[in-house]
Image (cartoon, helix red, strand yellow):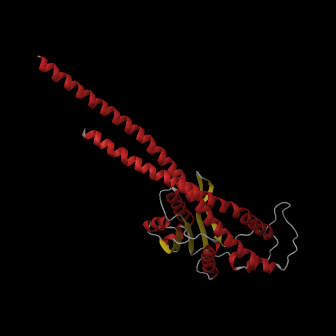
Amino acid sequence: MAGLKEIRTRIVSVKTTRQVTSAMKMISAARLKKAQDAILQIRPYADKLHQILISLGANLEDADESVYTQQREPEKILIVLISSNRGLCGGFNMNIAKKAFELVHNKYSLQLQLGEVDFICIGKQAEKQVKLRGMNVVESHQELFETLDFDHVYLLAEKIMKSFADGKYDKVELVYNQFLNAATQINTTEQFLPVELETETKGNQYYDYIFEPSKEYMIQELIPRSLKIQFYKAMLDSHAAEHGARMTAMHQATDNATELLKDLTLQYNKIRQASITNEILEIVSGAEALKG
């Protein structure tokens, strides 16, 4: 009977866990819809803005006038790592942290040895992983996902851009999960600063643009705007990818709990049946003994 009691306890525990994972799956599905709509709305605008910059690159002979396009020797590096504040989303946070560490070790190993690699971590999970590796976290922003809108993200993007313009950092890299669908997230690294513009024409891609009001205005206004939109898009991508990863993880956990319940119920019934059979045999044996 002790075996039956233990199995009953496990069945109750698994049922409770399944209720929790099922509820979390439905919550993530609802949030995913909103986050997915947000990223799908901004992508065409961000892509078109980037396309305009690339198209104008061959025409902007004075592009080096912008502080955001200045190519410098990469002595001081800033990695902006975007993860999530919460767990229970499969390998979402661990995989993007590994991507960031691979970037640092493969591309900036010398700067890392000299202690010239800093991290800005957006999300609690990223900060934990970076500190666990003994790397330098200069800022941590957990609040951005609480009110994820352009006004809040704009301020951080502007601060990072100012750090680059002031010469504090020579290169800034974004590391985040790009949303593809609910089951797939692409670990992505993008060079945020300096902005790289194509200055050579390819085939028939050169166009003789008439600039209004001026090329200088394009440099001073379009590039900063594009950078802020790019940063906001990365945040929305990661936000949607997080909910997709959590929904998928909770779906799998619910299915696993259902399968475990079937196995435990079958095991419980077998033991119970065997126990009843043994009790019947004992009763019959006792009755036969009394007859004798």
Where is 268 relative to 57, above or below?
Answer: above
For the N terminus, the quadrant is top left
Q: Quadrant of residue 214?
A: bottom right
Where is 215 relative to 40, above or below?
Answer: below
x and y, in percent, of residue 135 in the image: 47, 70
x and y, in percent, of residue 181 in the image: 62, 53
The residue that appears at 37% across and 48% down in the rendered structure is: 13
Q: Quadrant of residue 100?
A: bottom right
Between 163 and 4, which is closer to the camera in this rendering? 4
For the C terminus, the quadrant is top left
* Residue 3 appears in view: yes
Relative to residue 263, is residue 154 drawn left or right? right
Where is 103 relative to 119, above or below?
Answer: above
x and y, in percent, of residue 212 in the image: 85, 77
x and y, in percent, of residue 141 in the image: 52, 73
* Furthest residue toward top: 292
Between 135 and 245, which is closer to the camera in this rendering? 245
Q: Quadrant of residue 33?
A: bottom right
* Furthest residue toward bottom: 166
Total labels: the figure holds: 0
* Residue 177 appears in view: no
Between 208 and 187, which is closer to the camera in this rendering? 187
